[in-house]
Amino acid sequence: METPIVLDLPAGEHYVCICGRTGTAPFCDGSHKGTGFDPRHVVLTEPGKVAICSCRKSTNAPHCDGSHN
């Protein structure tokens, strides 16, 4: 995937799937084991919209920095 995953999330810890195997998209359910991919860990101190990198090129992972362009 070359575009970010944009989510409106509540405050707290979140794990976003980037392997594509999860049954609870867009969140990780552990299905990535053995794929070489790890979920993106996102921590928010307050609710908000976030753009999660899915191309693995961001220098600000897990957040998208536009490197996919």
Image: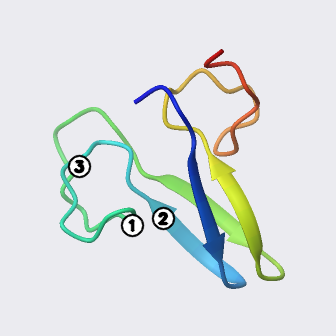
The secondary element bearing badge 2 is classed as: strand
Q: Amino acid at mark 2?
A: Tyr
Position of residue 6 in the picture relative to residue 38 (left or right): right
Question: Which circle's residue, 3 or 2, is located before the other in the chain?
Answer: 2
Residue 26: x, y in percent?
Answer: 39, 62
Task: Provide the residue designation for mark 2.
Answer: 15
Position of residue 26 in the picture relative to residue 52 (left or right): left
In the drawing, what numbered circle is on residue 54? none
In the drawing, what numbered circle is on residue 32? 3
Q: Residue at x 23, y 49 (%)?
A: 32
Between circles 3 and 1, the one closer to the viewer is 1
- Quadrant of the image occupied by residue 11: bottom right
| Residue placed most toward the observer, 41 or 52 | 52
Residue 14: x, y in percent?
Answer: 55, 71
Position of residue 10 in the picture relative to residue 35 (left or right): right
Residue 41: x, y in percent?
Answer: 57, 58
For the C terminus, the image quarter is: top right
**How many numbered marks, from 0 up?**
3
Task: Provide the residue designation for mark 1.
Answer: 27
Q: Tell whether label 2 touches label 3 (CB within 8 Å).
A: no
Q: Residue at x 26, y 68 (%)?
A: 29
Q: Tell whether label 1 touches label 3 (CB within 8 Å).
A: no
Q: Tell whether label 1 touches label 2 (CB within 8 Å).
A: yes
Q: Amino acid at mark 3?
A: His
Where 19 sits versus 9, above or below? above
Estimate how packed mark 3 is, as few (under 14), some (14 to 19) or many (20 or more) residues with alpha carbons within 10 Å.
some
Where 65 sits versus 45, above or below? above
- Quadrant of the image occupied by residue 62: top right
Estimate how packed mark 1 is, as few (under 14), some (14 to 19) or many (20 or more) residues with alpha carbons within 10 Å.
some
